[in-house]
Image: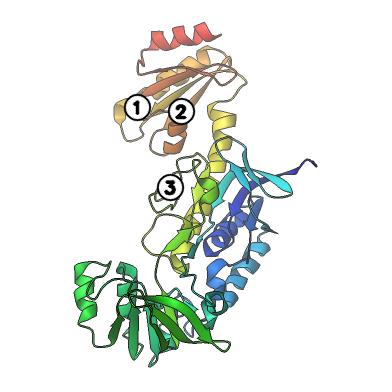
Amino acid sequence: MREKKRVQYDVVIIGGGAAGLTAGIYCGRAQLKTLIIEKALVGGLATYTNEIENYPGFPEGTNGLDLMNLYQKQAKRFGVTFKLTDVKEVRLDRTKKEVETFRNIFEAKAVIVASGGRPRITKAKNEEKFLFDKGISFCATCDAAANTGKTVMVIGSGDAAIEEGMFLTKFASKVIVSVIHDEGKMDCNEIAKAQALSNEKMEFKWNTMPDSFEGNGHLDTVVLKNLKTGKLDPVKVDTCFEFIGYLPNTEIFTDILELNKQRYLVTNEKMETKLLGVFAAGDVREKELRQVATAVGDGAIAGVAAEKFIAETEIFKNQILQKEKIGFIYVYSAIDAPSRELMPMLQEIEKEFNGKVKLSLLDIYKGKSLCERLSCDVEPMTIFYTKNGEVIEQSRNSDRPHIIEKLKSLL
């Protein structure tokens, strides 16, 4: 078998939707060698949205394809490389992370996962023919205005389905809801249920699910099947909204990154996962709202975080744990006077060794992530290490004789 080619990048971004493209723009502008890998269409699900009226900066609205083309053009302007291929495997628990495709192994200092997800579909007959711009939608916020005065259907009875259905009543003349349960039973919260049942614009089809979708080029009929009688009920609609769940594209990250019960990636507010140098952004991560605007925010944070991580890695390698001399690191707090007052004494000790040892000063607040790499979360603390960067001792003893004795023992 032919050996795969290895290619080095500073940052590899998995996924070329709004979040991935934004992260790419930030990384590229920071002059990081950046690769975006997208298995389908650059721009992701947003490219299928015909009208986007709630994205800032476009008073007349825009469409997803045009908007994502602008993102891609901007990313290319900053030197971002694109590869249209599928990621087969990742190895992220190492300094040089690996993202493997069919032909290549891409090595990176940092990886941003922006692989997005896909809406769960009913799998009824002919469904694939009408997805996205042909009559089946998964976003009421995106497509509600286009259905002003029209008849629409909502599939589902969970919180998202019922809340989005009520939102649609502000625009559509009628919202027909297909519910798989007996009359009066839903999966949503009781408040939403009561509001929906009292909404004059909402009509419910109980014990039903789609059997097929029909239309000539564009959806015009949803054929519902009664789950108790088997009877088919053709319902004329202009658009059908499906809210039966969302599936994040996280299969290859199982047992590698932390996932919640719904299989979304877990991050902090900095888009950091629990693996150092691995970030996640956009619809693939655990969050409340999945829109282009929030994906852009995630991507910007992840891009900046990746840049900072790479810069701090260089500082950590070349300054904090340099390998030219025996070293000691003083972890202090700039806002704590006693902690600051010890710094001159440590600097004097460094001079006394006539260039044989290296002192590094690390503010626990400004250099929080660097302190985390040293597993140090208290101050003041003196850390001693050998020429090969091996940490020998972390000591809260800042006594001068102790520090001198320890350094002499390492020489």
Q: Quadrant of the N terminus?
A: top right
User: Residue 94: which quarter of the image?
Assistant: top right
Tell me: 184 left or right of 373: left
User: In terms of depth relative to the viewer, which is nearer, 312 or 112?
Assistant: 112
Pointer 3 residue: 259
Question: Can you tell which of label 3 and label 1 is closer to the viewer?
Answer: 3
User: In terms of depth relative to the viewer, which is nearer, 307 or 336?
Assistant: 307
x and y percentages locating residue 408 in the rendered image: 51, 7
Pointer 1 residue: 379
Q: Callout 3: few (<14), some (14-19), or many (20+) C-alpha neighbours within 10 Å?
A: some
User: Residue 28: which quarter of the image?
Assistant: bottom right
Disc sitting over residue 374 in the figure = 2
Asked whether the beta carbons under mark 3 and mark 2 sit within 8 Å of each other, the answer is no
Q: CA distance from mark 3 to mark 2?
A: 26 Å
Residue visible at 43% across and 81% down in the picture: 240
Q: Quadrant of the C terminus?
A: top right
Q: Amino acid at mark 2?
A: Leu
